[in-house]
Amino acid sequence: MTQSSPQNLILVGRVAGAFGVRGELRIATYTEDPLTLTRFKALTRQDGSPALTVQTARVVKDGVVARCAGVDTKEAADALRGLRLYVPRAALPEPDEDEYYLADLIGLPVRHVATDELLGKIKSVQNFGADDLLEIDPALGGQTWYLPFTRAAVPEVKIADGVVLADPPALVGEPEGPESPAEDDDGERHYD
């Protein structure tokens, strides 16, 4: 069996633990339809090695309960808790026009929508519980920063052109808009 390179794998679920005493697994799914997991021949680990083969599944809150080949006891199911499940990108259907997979954004350059200035490159897509965030590796080096993945901050994603256009919000402490005139001790305004 040919293994996929980790760059071509898409995270589709995570084993949450055992369900019952007969080796069934609770799997949190990251697909639009939780039963999509049953359509893949085999799920892999992040390194591309085989992880699970789903034989049957039923939908439950936050995912599926699945019976998988070779997992026959509660202990075997519990040992898989936390296992992340991937499929090759090629196994997924092509997205519709003007749609894309978040994984397709990784590595794309990010340019300012108004100035065309190169801001950096997308390192990852994160979600810490609220909305998706694009982790940006700055063009000029330095520490990565996060860009909210909202229509306001990212007005255009051009997958075919290989670019993301962004209008990042002002950083904390940075002035928004034109500078305010300074006041000196006598209360007069000066425009420097």
Image (spheres, rainbow, N blue to C red):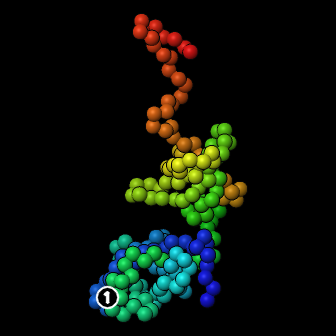
Estimate how packed mark 1 is, as few (under 14), some (14 to 19) or many (20 or more) residues with alpha carbons within 10 Å. some
Q: Residue furthest top?
A: 186
- Quarter residue 89 falls in: bottom right
Q: Is residue 130 left or right of residue 3?
A: left
> Image point 63% across, 59% down: which residue?
107
What percent of the width, then of the height, locates residue 90?
A: 63, 76
Give me the residue at 48% from left, 16% from top.
182
Residue displayed at 63% across by 48% down: 139
Q: Is residue 154 visible?
A: no
Spot the residue most to the front.
142
In the rendered image, residue 73, in percent from the top left (x then y), is placed at: 33, 92
| Residue type, numbered disc 1 | Glu
Q: Position of residue 61 (x, y in %)?
A: 34, 73
The answer to whether residue 184 is above or below residue 139 is: above
Q: Secondary structure at mark 1?
A: helix
Q: Quadrant of the C terminus?
A: top right
The one of 159 and 74 positioned closer to us in this rendering:
74
Residue situated furthest left in the rendering: 21
Task: Choose between 113 and 46: the one closer to the eye.
Answer: 46
- Residue 119 in the image: state x and y as whole percent: 62, 45
Instruction: Tell how many labels.
Output: 1
Q: Is residue 99 above or below residue 41?
A: above
Question: Can see residue 131?
Answer: yes
The residue that mark 1 highlights is 75
User: In which quadrant is the N terminus drawn?
Assistant: bottom right
The extreme right residue here reads: 161
Question: At 50% from the left edge and 30% from the top edge, which residue is drawn?
Answer: 175
